[in-house]
Image (spheres, grey):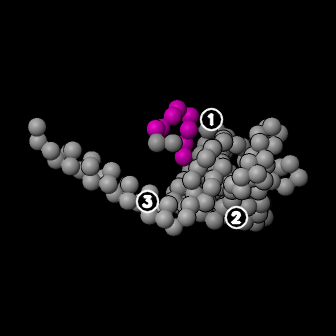
Amino acid sequence: MAEEKKGIKPIAQNREAHHEYFVMESLEVGIELVGTEVKSLRGGGVNLKEAWADIDNAELIVKGMHISPYEQGNIFNKDPLRPRRLLAHKSEIRHLQQQIKLQGYTLVPLSLYFKHGRVKMQLGLCKGKKLYDKRATAAARDARRDIDRAMKNAKY
């Protein structure tokens, strides 16, 4: 989501996901929330770092996502770490379930954003990186940065 699209307002990014995993596919899904959670999201009170998604009884569930309680929410606030249902088509859920079972992939939330007033989540089908993969990615990023710096400073 590097470019800003019309009607899309970013809430949170899971930057650690790209460091820890190879993202094989990504999917936009809706998320089932209560009113005070949405108000808290508008204030930016969410943490995706420890979150993951799972499939239980043919339903996508996100677990470990922390949405801070809304300050004026009093009795209507829910548990900040409660599991939340993700909204996707049955065919998409079946496809994800097959990939998880056969390939050993993991479902990781990549970002959370408002799209035309609705909260959406970018869900990634990911494969874990080994330590040497992380080192190779860091080396490639550093090399690319050095090349860009040299090109910028080069005089023609």
Q: Sequence order check: which comes first, mark 2 or mark 1?
A: 2
What secondary structure is the magenta-colored segment mainly?
A: loop
| Residue where numbered disc 3 is placed | 136
Q: Sequence order check: which comes first, mark 2 or mark 3?
A: 2
| Residue where numbered disc 2 is placed | 64
Position in image of residue 23 (x %, y %): 58, 50
The span from disc 2 to disc 1 (Cα, nearest Å) is: 26 Å
* Magenta span includes 7: yes
Q: Amino acid at mark 3?
A: Ala
Q: Residue at x 50, y 61 (%)?
A: 133
Q: Amino acid at mark 2?
A: Gly
* Magenta span includes 124: no
103 or 59: nearer the viewer:
103
Position in image of residue 98 (x %, y %): 78, 47
Q: Secondary structure at mark 1?
A: loop
Position in image of residue 13 (x %, y %): 54, 53
The span picked out in magenta is 3-10
